[in-house]
Amino acid sequence: MAFTLPALPYAHDALEPHIDALTMQIHHGKHHQAYVDNLNKAIAGTPNENKSLEELVKAAGTISPAVRNNGGGHWNHSFFWELLAPNAGGQPTGALADAINDVFGSFDSFKEKFNTAGATRFGSGWAWLIINNGTLQITSTPNQDNPLMDVAEVKGTPILGIDVWEHAYYLKYQNRRPEYLTNIWNVINWNKVAENFAKAAK
């Protein structure tokens, strides 16, 4: 079965002023759609055609670059849209908040370390909060790789990921990636992150 573009769970302008509507329209409707289209082309008529997205991503080291890059792009963006929400932000609560405080000392310290991981990722890529061997860890990946991949430098289960490709922020923030990273916390859906944490921690 061919992969399809998931619908956004909010309107294009719902994340204003932190992420502008035009960026969302292009990022979701053009960039993500292109990953889906190119992934479908790359797997057509091959043994990968009947594999799940998760199976393709986890086998990144043994599949073609086209499947790795576009499969990663599809997985990463499908994950990313769910992590954003209007009128969100604030801080996590409950078990997730406790885990962040235990590992990073405080929520502010966590944000600072996460923003540094995103700001210092050379070129295009992603910053991640993962569970690795039962512990929270911050990491980053190049291009459309993610920590589920067998080729990832640091492997684990993502519970939060932020896109630091220029197409995610350039229309509004130009070259000011750190400003984008500071502002995106205003639209992070901590309920979804907590849900991811609970699943991954089982």
Image (cartoon, rainbow, N blue to C red):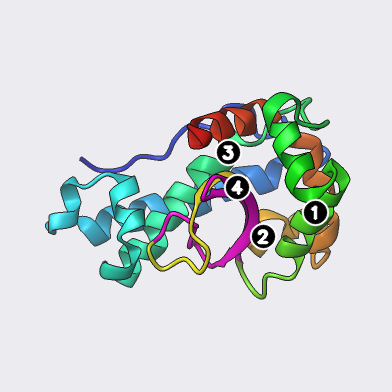
Chain-order first, disc 1 or disc 2 = 2
SS at circle 1: helix
Which region is colored magenta? Answer: 125-149
Q: Nearer the viewer, residue 55 or 164?
A: 55
Please state which of the two labelled residues, at mark 1 or mark 4, is closer to the viewer. Answer: 4
The residue indicated by pointer 1 is 180
| Residue drawn at point x = 31 percent, y = 43 percent | 3
The residue indicated by pointer 4 is 135
Q: Position of residue 40 (x, y in %)?
A: 27, 52
Residue farthest to the bottom, as pictured: 122
How far separated are the C-alphas under marks 3 and 1? 16 Å
Asked whether, in this view, residue 15 is left or right of residue 80, the answer is right
Please state which of the two labelled residues, at mark 2 or mark 4, is closer to the viewer. Answer: 4
> Is the residue 199 above or below the residue 148 in the image?
above
The amino acid type found where label 1 is placed reads Tyr
Callout 3–callout 1 Cβ contact below 8 Å: no
The amino acid type found where label 3 is placed reads Trp
Crowd rating for badge 3 (residues with CA inside 10 Å; few <14, some 14–19, many 20+): many
The residue indicated by pointer 3 is 81
Asked whether, in this view, residue 55 is left or right of residue 104, the answer is left
The residue indicated by pointer 2 is 164
> Is the residue 117 above or below the residue 183 in the image?
below
Q: How many marks?
A: 4
The amino acid type found where label 4 is placed reads Thr
Q: Where is residue 30 in the image (x, y as percent from the top left)?
A: 51, 51
Callout 1–callout 2 Cβ contact below 8 Å: yes
Q: Where is residue 54 in the image (x, y as percent from the top left)?
A: 34, 47
Asked if the stretch drawn in magenta spans residue 55, the answer is no
Q: Which of 175 and 142 is in front in this view?
A: 142
Chain-order first, disc 3 or disc 2 = 3
